[in-house]
Image (cartoon, helix red, strand yellow):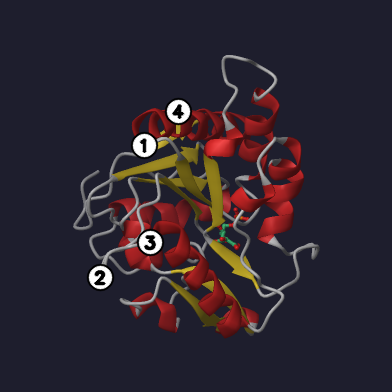
Amino acid sequence: MVGFNLQPEPRIVSDLAELHRAGADEFIRCAREAISARGRFVVSLAGGSTPKGAYALTAGDQKDPAKRLPWDKIHLFFSDERNVPPDDKESNYRMANESLLSKVPVPTENVHRIPAELDPSTAATQYEAELRNFFKPKPGDWPRFDLFMLGMGPDGHTASLFPGSTALNENSRWVVANWVEKFKTYRITFTFPVINHAAQVMFFVAGEDKAPVLKEVLQGKEAVYPSQRVRPVDGRLLWIVDKAAAKLL
Ligand code: 6PG
């Protein structure tokens, strides 16, 4: 499997239901580990459609005392957002709120939504300011998320870091407004240095339509896709993929 870009072995599960189960279990495991080690769990939620089922299972698991989490010690951020209000059907916040946040006793102030109803560069600037206020970094430091959740598109994009977009080469900002030519719109997204300073990054990838790019991303000789630039500098990288997406591996 080892290609030039040295991606870790993916965890292949049989279908979307199992992928959601694996994702929810990993969320709870990481939360427990971070809270016992550092007193809090700081996570960045993935957008798109694939993680929704994992969020719903995580919420459902809270009925089980063995899986219950202290939500007052959990802070939730968003890996990226569409330039829409929070009640828009395209909103990643709305997806996460409907499937998880509205179903668990998380204090409102612990949910750090991207103010994506604003113009994109103001939204990015405000969100970065909120992050810096939260993490209180020393000069030159990057934030360290305990868990950074990501999906991947059929074009190899992740978060809103799309092929050919300017944000791919951002090395000082934490959050930027990124023009996405194919959608003729801006997205607000974390940048690679933030992703790559996480303690753990977890990709969720499902569906046959992603099989060709997943093979390239995991086994390709060249690092040409944005998802291949996710390389934790001092952290763990986990790919959870379903059989359909893994069919060419
Ligand atoms: C978004 C996501 C994006 C997503 C991929 C996969 O806002 O759309 O952050 O990066 O993870 O496009 O999306 P699906 O899970 O819907 O296939």
Circle 2 sits in a helix, a strand or a loop, which is it? loop
Which amino acid type is marked by label 3? Lys
Distance of label 2 from label 1 (alpha carbons): 22 Å
Residue 128 picture location, percent across and down: 48, 71
Distance of label 3 from label 1 (alpha carbons): 15 Å
Question: How many residues crowd around disc 2 within 10 Å: few (fewer than 14), some, or many (20 or more)?
Answer: few
**Residue designated by label 4:** 32
Q: Looking at the image, do the residues carrying marks 2 and 4 touch, with CB atoms under 8 Å apart?
A: no
Mark number, residue 47: none
Identify the residue at horizontal 68%, vertical 57% (top origin): 93
**Residue designated by label 3:** 136
Mark number, residue 140: 2
Distance of label 1 from label 4 (alpha carbons): 10 Å
Q: Nearer the viewer, residue 26 or 68?
A: 68
Which amino acid type is marked by label 2? Gly
Sequence-wise, the earlier of marks 1 and 4 is: 4
Identify the residue at horizontal 60%, vertical 45% (top origin): 51
Sequence-wise, the earlier of marks 2 and 4 is: 4
Distance of label 3 from label 4 (alpha carbons): 23 Å
Identify the residue at horizontal 38%, vertical 61% (top origin): 136
Q: Nearer the viewer, mark 3 or mark 4?
A: 3
Distance of label 3 from label 2 (alpha carbons): 11 Å
Q: Nearer the viewer, mark 3 or mark 2?
A: 3
Question: How many residues crowd around disc 1 within 10 Å: few (fewer than 14), some, or many (20 or more)?
Answer: few
